[in-house]
Image (tube, helix red, strand yellow):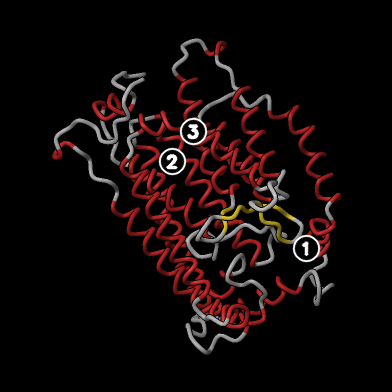
Amino acid sequence: MGKFRFFTDKPLEKYRKSDSSIALLMILMWGLGMVTLYFCSSDSGFLKFNDSLHFMKRQLISSALGFVLFCVFLSLNMETVRKILPILVFGSLFLCLLTLVPGIGVERNGARRWIRIPFLSTFQPSEAIKFVSILFLANYFDKQSRIQKKEDRNVFPAVALLIIFSGSILMQQDFSTSVFVFMIGIVLFVVSGQKIIWLFPLMTIIGPLCALMVFLEPYRLSRIIGFFSPEEYQETINYQSIAARKAISSGGFWGQGFGSGLTKISNIPEIQSDYIFAGWVEALGLFGVLAYFALLGLFSWRVLHCALTTADRFASIAVFGFLAAIIGQSLMNVAVVAGVLPTTGVPLPFFSSGGSSIIITFAMCGFILSASRIDNIEDRKLSLGGVIYE
């Protein structure tokens, strides 16, 4: 077995610098998310835990762990990531199985989506699956692209494992994340130029199955009913979404500012999690909405530039997948808060309270910055173990 090589053997001056704008935007969005979390969660933290900083402390600890992973994936070259990928795949699937083990898996509201972490809190394995599935598909599609005859290329192993990834999340009663991971996988099939004719017969099975999953779970069905009947069930199904829209409308153009002037957000249950964007909008108004999308747009532009310019195909596909995951999740969350989509339980990256989400988001950003350093043929040779694949 070959040795893992963490840094490529080149003089320091030959390295292309990482895209610092991506790092700056990441830190800026995380910082704004922490400020928003503080003002949105202080009342809830005091009422539930007698500590107004409870959610802030948890988020800081998770952010520190995420920063460690950020540094790890920033330092690893693509060859090393490929070598440890089987460990990551089996490890993430094993974590999913642990959610079913009594004493380790944590059940909340009838769903077992978390595992206990000693001395810390809980971790949601579906976030790890989201990260690993993108890396696996990027690596597999890169290998398939090296096969000269197109008729010899085979997408079915990728389809099978994507179904396994999504199914392992569905097993945890996390329907929305399962569908999200599957959709990100389809996006990677398309952008990598794979045949997607298999998708049409598969959707004839998956489509009815998804509908069945919705109707079999009362809380999922109630979300759909509440979405199509927004003026009804105001004290039950639609209470959270209506309270969020009231907070948004109270923000006006300039918002009420962070501080004691925020009154509507205290009426939103669990605002520190999936509905934190409502607190952001009440504080900063339409101006805050425009500022948020401006930052998200700049982040998307720089990461897309990285995906299009990196010389390593594996890195390019993976970076695009991570961008699709972060941006897709952000847009879904905002759409839910604004009442455009039914409640999904998808957190807002960099903002929502949730250790698993911030840890994996930081890991994605570390990989993206590592990929932004690959810019020429020599880098590609080192990244692919000394072999150039045209």
Q: Is residue 80 left or right of residue 55?
A: left
The three-letter amino acid code for the residue at tag 2 is Val
Q: Earlier in the sequence, mark 1 or mark 3?
A: 3
Q: Quadrant of residue 163?
A: top right
Query: For the residues marked 2 and 3, what is the alpha-carbon distance in whole angstroms?
Result: 20 Å
Which residue is drawn at the image coordinates 53% and 31% (left, top)? 137
Which residue is drawn at the image coordinates 70% and 70% (left, top)? 241
Q: Nearer the viewer, mark 1 or mark 3?
A: 3
Which x, y percent locates residue 289? 51, 69
Query: For the residues marked 1 and 3, what is the alpha-carbon distance in whole angstroms?
Result: 41 Å
Which residue is drawn at the image coordinates 71% and 57% (left, top)? 107
Determine whether the residue tagged by mark 2 lies in a helix, strand or loop. Answer: helix
**Where residue 87 is drawn, which disc sits there?**
3
**Where residue 319 is drawn, which disc sits there?**
2
Q: Is residue 192 left or right of residue 334?
A: left
Query: For the residues marked 2 and 1, what is the alpha-carbon distance in whole angstroms?
Result: 34 Å
Q: Quadrant of residue 197?
A: top right
**Where residue 227 is drawn, which disc sits there?**
1
Which residue is drawn at the image coordinates 63% and 54% (left, top)? 114
Disc 1 residue crowd, few under 14, some 14–19, many 20+, Cα 10 Å: many
The three-letter amino acid code for the residue at tag 1 is Phe
Report the front residue among 174 and 196: 174
Which x, y percent locates residue 34? 45, 70
Report the front residue among 350 and 100: 100
Report the front residue among 97 and 223: 97
Which x, y percent locates residue 387? 31, 18
The three-letter amino acid code for the residue at tag 3 is Ile
Q: Is residue 15 left or right of residue 338?
A: left
